[in-house]
Amino acid sequence: MTTTQASRLAASLTLPLVPISHAGGAEVAQDADVVSVGVMAQNDIAMFRTLIPVDASIQAIVFAADAIGADQGGGASGTIDLDFFKIDRPSDPNTTFTRVSGGAAIASAIDVTAAVVPTDERFAVLDHTSNVKHAWELAGLSAAPSYAHFLIGATASAATTIAGKMSVSVKHAV
């Protein structure tokens, strides 16, 4: 990740983060976390603020977006990858974030040239046999990490053309 990308990444996350409250063993469905984005260059990242426990069992990751890749006279362009990120310095409001997998662990190349209706992307990359895995396993880690939470980030795998909003909602059990 370049310094420019890291700066854009840090600027896209407004602290405080949104913890998902839950009772032990309970299923949790959160309200959609909405992020406003400007035109995104390829590899720009927008972070969603919802904290996901690394030991959670994720049942659904629902993504929606405005037509941020719509044709503005120069052609339509825009795809988004969804992935897990860790918070490098949780107590620092100017923190940076690190992608924890090789990329696109949740979904790859979601076409945003037209509006994306709320769509469950949980099994876009991993098949149904992954439904018993913890979030850290879905992220491609070989062991549970020392940190407690992930964030979901949306990376522009192809540049977008206009500003708009994206949202993500996660349903999980801990």
Image (cartoon, helix red, strand yellow):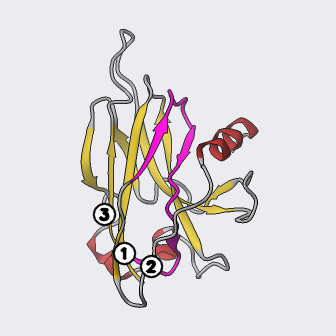
Please, is residue 118 above or below residue 2 in the view? below
- The image quarter in which residue 67 lies: top left
Residue 149 point in image, percent of width and height: 57, 71
Q: Residue at x 63, y 78 (%)?
A: 145
Q: Nearer the viewer, residue 68 or 141?
A: 68
Q: Give the label, 1 or 3, closer to the camera.
A: 1
Which residue lies under the disc numbered 2?
56
* Residues under numbered marks 2 and 1 in contact, where contact means CB atoms less than 8 Å apart: yes
86 vs 114, left or right, is right
Mark 3 crowd level (few <14, some 14–19, many ≥20, 10 Å Cα):
some
Mark 2 lies on a secondary structure that is loop
Q: Which residue is mark 1?
A: 172
Please name whichever residue, 118 or 133, is drawn nearer the observer in this view of the structure.
118
Residue 123 bears which disc, if any?
A: 3
Residue 49 colored magenta?
yes
Instruction: Report the magenta residues as a range.
Output: 33-58
* Residue 115 vertical position relative to residue 166 in the rendered view, above or below: above
Q: Report how far apart the C-alphas of labels 1 and 3 lie in the structure.
A: 14 Å
Q: Secondary structure at mark 3?
A: loop
Q: CA distance from mark 2 to mark 1?
A: 6 Å
Mark 2: amino acid? Ala
Residue 60 image-quadrant placement: bottom left
Cα–Cα span, label 3 and label 2 = 16 Å
